[in-house]
Image: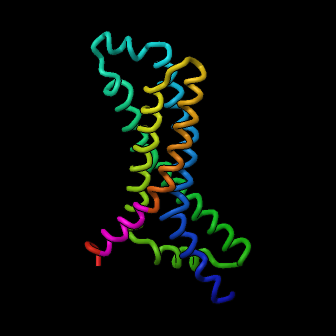
Amino acid sequence: MEQATLFIPAIVTKSMLLELGPVFTALIIAGRSGAGIAAQISSMAVTKQVHALRALAIDPVVFLVTPRVLALMVGLPMLALLANLAGVFGGFLYCVGKLGMTAVVFLHASASTVYLKDILVSLCKSTVWGGVISVMGCLHGLRAHGGNVGVGRATRDTVVHSMILILISDFFLTRIFRILISMFLK
């Protein structure tokens, strides 16, 4: 076995844990759940159901927004963790099946590169992005007007804005976490 192939488990594990798993999961959920949230709330807004809630003295933010934000902030990190495991398992299958690496070598090389801080960074990023996706869906949904066209516009804007914010915030969150880790975990 070539010496360079011994780096594959470490590279796969680190890249899945810190970037690929959380980012791809967030982008997929932005397209699926973000669009669903926006479509549901915008349909309620254009049919005046949100105004009916206000008329009944029910705060739409507390009743409609808060549960969705909390749900995605809890659910997205769990999905990202599953994506991380699936990606590392895919790397494991490739290394063992195609490259002839033993399972023990893969697991040792992979486990020696993962630290608790990497897992926490992955979960924190996913939590932030869960909030971003749900807030974007609720924001655009509550602002919708103009019937079915408004529902479509709110849904499209939610997906586009969520994805852009995920990609931009990934850069800044990575920088912030690197600074914090270097300050507190030397």
Range drawn in magenta: 172-182
Q: Residue at x 39, y 62 (%)?
A: 121
- Residue 166: percent from left, percent from top: 49, 52
Asked whether 168 or 40 is in front, the reply is 168
Image point 51% across, 55% down: which residue? Answer: 167
Foreground residue among 108 and 151: 151
Q: Position of residue 76 (x, y in %)?
A: 46, 46
| Residue ID at (37%, 61%) | 120
Please give left or right for residue 157 compared with residue 125 in the image. Answer: right
Image coords of residue 91 (percent x, y): 63, 68
Relative depth, front residue between 49 and 116 = 49
Q: Is residue 122 depicted above or below 68 in this figure?
A: below
The vertical placement of 103 against 53, above or below, is: below
The percent position of residue 7, horizontal first and vertical second, equals: 58, 81
In the orientation shown, which residue stands out farthest toward the front?
146
With respect to residue 80, does 116 lie above or below?
below
- Residue drawn 47% across and 32% down? 140
Q: Is residue 137 magenta?
A: no
Residue 173 colored magenta? yes
Work out which quarter of the rendered image holds the N terminus and state it: bottom right
Check the picture and name the quadrant holding the C terminus. bottom left
